[in-house]
Image: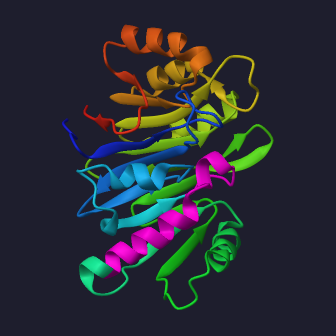
Amino acid sequence: MDVRENIWVAGPGGALPSTRGRKVGSGFLARHGNGWVQFDAGFGTYNASGRLAAVDLADVRILVLTHLHADHVGDAITTIHGIQLLSQKKYGEVQLLEILGPAGIREAVLEGLVWLGAPEFKFNLVFHEGPGKYGPMRLFSVMHSSIESVAAVLHGDIEVMYTGDISDRSGNFRAILEATENPGVLITEATEPNNPCHITAVSAEALSQAGNYEMTVIGHCRDNHEAAVGKICRRSGGRIVAAQAGLGITI
């Protein structure tokens, strides 16, 4: 299965600072039909998305925000405003943008849009909160340490499973594997050992193997565990890759 130019990395993931010392967060884009789905919008991802020649942000129709940590939503308001402005310019009217996330995401986004200070602009948004099936998307609950988050699976020509941040616990793995119907791309955030808030790179490898995904993308690749992630990528024979901004995924 070839999905060249269909899965793109806007931000390699990470807290502050990132591997290269920039304030970047998590952001991934997947083509769906004639449009795009964006998973998370951390710091720096809006500008990074705009530099992707294969992606037209005017055609982003779904934005999934897994939880309210800044490295996953730091650019959310800029992203929403930018997508809607671009769609208005391209189509002559603001296209509908669906925003999916955990309970409370609607209130958080609307409050952020007030602070944006663009009262004359007419947003065209619909919100879906909590676990459920929303068109081609399914959200389900996972735990990020003690924080309840959501993971998302996009059903289409290729199934894209995005876990966001999850802690290293069997319940998370079980929920992800149960939600996987046709293993395609797994995008998961992993970090250094002894961090109770995230799975490790070794656990990401184990999850990838358990689900028999055709391609796995590991985010949150920071300096202090790049070597471990690199080793896992090499021994996977190309089925596991480290997220890098501007990377297009082919499986």
State which quadrant residue 220 falls in: top right
Answer above or below: position of 43 versus 89: above
58 and 195: which is toward the camera: 58
Residue 24 location, x and y as percent? 55, 42
Residue 29 location, x and y as percent? 38, 50
Answer above or below: position of 194 versus 178: above
> Which residue appears at 66% of the width and 52% of the height?
67
> Which residue appears at 37% of the width and 83% of the height?
94
Image quarter where the C terminus lies is top left
Stretch of the chain drawn in magenta: 65-88
Colour setting: rainbow
Is 77 situated left or right of 88 in this image?
right
> Which residue appears at 53% of the width and 91% of the height?
120
Residue 227 location, x and y as percent? 51, 10
Image quarter where the N terminus lies is top left
Answer above or below: position of 75 versus 135: above
Q: Main secondary structure of the magenta part?
A: helix
Q: Is residue 206 visible?
A: yes
Is 107 situated left or right of 82 in this image?
right
65 and 83: which is toward the camera: 83
